[in-house]
Image (cartoon, rainbow, N blue to C red):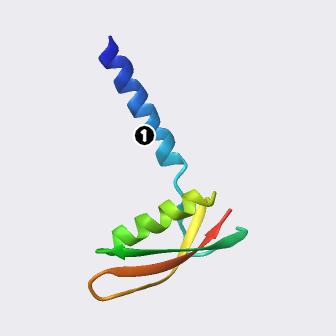
Amino acid sequence: MKALIITTLLVGFISVNTVSAAQEVNHADGKEKIGVVSASNAYTLDELTDALSHKADEKGATAFKVLSASGNNKLHGTAEIYK
């Protein structure tokens, strides 16, 4: 019984966490720009995008648009964030 309760709570937490993540967008039509975030030391573009999404979440954004990504061994990028 305890295992079922713990599993249910974990699944619920994961579902809530996924819903609150900022979504990457290509166009900011109808959204209010609330700032810019940056991230560094990513090895892949997916890692960089995840880091930018996490920073957007921390600032209360619901969406973000990647503005730049550059680097040789480790990537650095910036993104506009929107509500």
Residue 45 against residue 8 in the figure, above or below: below
Q: Residues within 10 Å of mark 1 (few under 14, many from 20)?
A: few
Residue at 49% across, 63% down: 53
Q: How many marks?
A: 1
**Quadrant position of residue 25:** bottom right
Residue 22 against residue 65 in the figure, above or below: above
Q: Quadrant of the N terminus?
A: top left
> Left or right of 4: which side holds 63?
right
Would residue 73 be seen by someone viewing this image from the given angle?
yes
Residue 21 against residue 4 in the figure, above or below: below
Residue 80, percent across and down?
60, 75
Q: Residue farthest to the top?
A: 1
Residue at 59% across, 64% down: 63
> Left or right of 20: which side holds 15?
left
Would residue 30 be seen by someone viewing this image from the given angle?
no
At mark 1, the secondary structure is helix
Query: On the image, numbered disc 1 is attached to which residue?
Result: 14
Residue at 40% across, 25% down: 8
Relative to the observer, which residue lies in front, 18 or 3? 3
The amino acid type found where label 1 is placed reads Ile
Residue 30, percent across and down?
72, 69
Residue 59, percent across and down?
62, 61
Residue 11, percent across and down?
40, 33
**Quadrant position of residue 48:** bottom left
Q: Quadrant of the C terminus?
A: bottom right
Residue at 47% across, 47% down: 18
